[in-house]
Image (spheres, coloured by chain):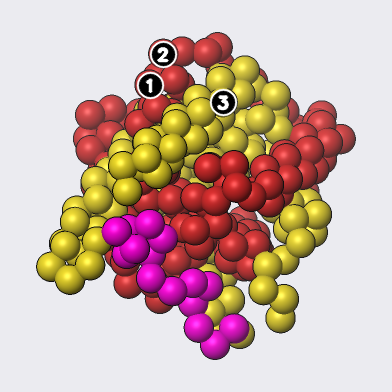
Amino acid sequence: MRLAGVLVGLVFGVTLSWTGMSDPDVIRGALLFKEAYLFLFFASAVLTATIGVHLLRRRRALLTGERIDWQSVPVQRRHVAGSVLFGTGWALADTCPGPIATQVGQGVVWSLFTIVGVVAGIWLFLRRQPAAIDA
Amino acid sequence: MEEQLPWYIGGPVLGLCVVAIRGLMNERLGATGAFSEVIDRVGRRSLAFDWRGWFLIGLVVGGLVFALVRGEPGFDGYGWLTRTFEGDGRIFIAVILLGAGVLIGFGAKTAGGCTSGNGLTGTSMLSRAALVATATFFGTAIAVSFVIEALT
């Protein structure tokens, strides 16, 4: 499981870096509708993931033997409120958690400030509400 | 090495990462969850991370491998921030990135996911909450970006 985690993380990290998702100007160009790349990239990723996980549904997970399935929670205020905060931070720093980790790996010094902020934000949340919640 | 991997290769590879985590472990891929796992464990004075902690390590190493192969990081400066603030004003870059980081971390945890957890994994499950979260953070980020553009 740990090996799977690190290998998938590696592929994910190289892909984010190589597609320019760690570059704040690429994110900004997309959010200002100057470049279509991010939207095409994101849509093709979502499409691939959606088809893939639905093909796997109700089969057995290879490593755990667990039956592949999921339940979704109803829409709550926190999904909107949290995403407004997240979206604001995303636009200010032109980066989000996955790309921040790859920026740190690339040796981008400015990203150290962002990652300290992310750690502080998550730590604040965990301190207020220790039980993990998922979407 | 190509400057930017074509989207029709990068996108499906990213999607397949979500499929791999689902098919191997029936788990949800998400970068915020990975950060959260590491912060939670370290807070308990442990380094025995589950797969999510190792996923985060993989992300950092992925960035490192990319920079080593390329011979330099993926970009210079830091976007609009280093273009706007120069000299002593650079302290504002640190303050803004720190504040943005807090919003990103706290906001993503509150919403149950970030661009990967909600945007990619949650939408692949056709979760209505994830679809609402994704529409909200994209809409907010676009609006804030236009405000920054107007002010700078």
Letter of the yellow chain:
B
Magenta range is: B70-84
- Residue occupied by mark 2: A77
Mark 3 burial class by Cα count in 10 Å: few <14, some 14-19, many 20+: some
Instruction: Select label 3 or label 1 by which is in front.
Output: 3
Check disc 1 and report its element: helix, strand or loop. Answer: helix
Judge depth for marks 2 and 3 and give the one in front: 3
The numbered mark at residue A81 is: 1
Q: Which residue is mark 3?
A: B135
Rendering coords of residue A112 (x, y %):
30, 64
Q: Secondary structure at mark 3?
A: helix
Give me the residue at 80% from left, 54% from top. Answer: B8
Q: Which amino acid, mark 3?
A: Ala
Identified by mark 1, the residue type is: Ala
A84, above or below B38, in the image: above
**B86 over B73 or under it: above or below:** above
Q: Quadrant of residue B141?
A: top left
Name the disc covering residue B74, or none.
Answer: none
Whether discs 2 and 3 lie on one chain: the answer is no
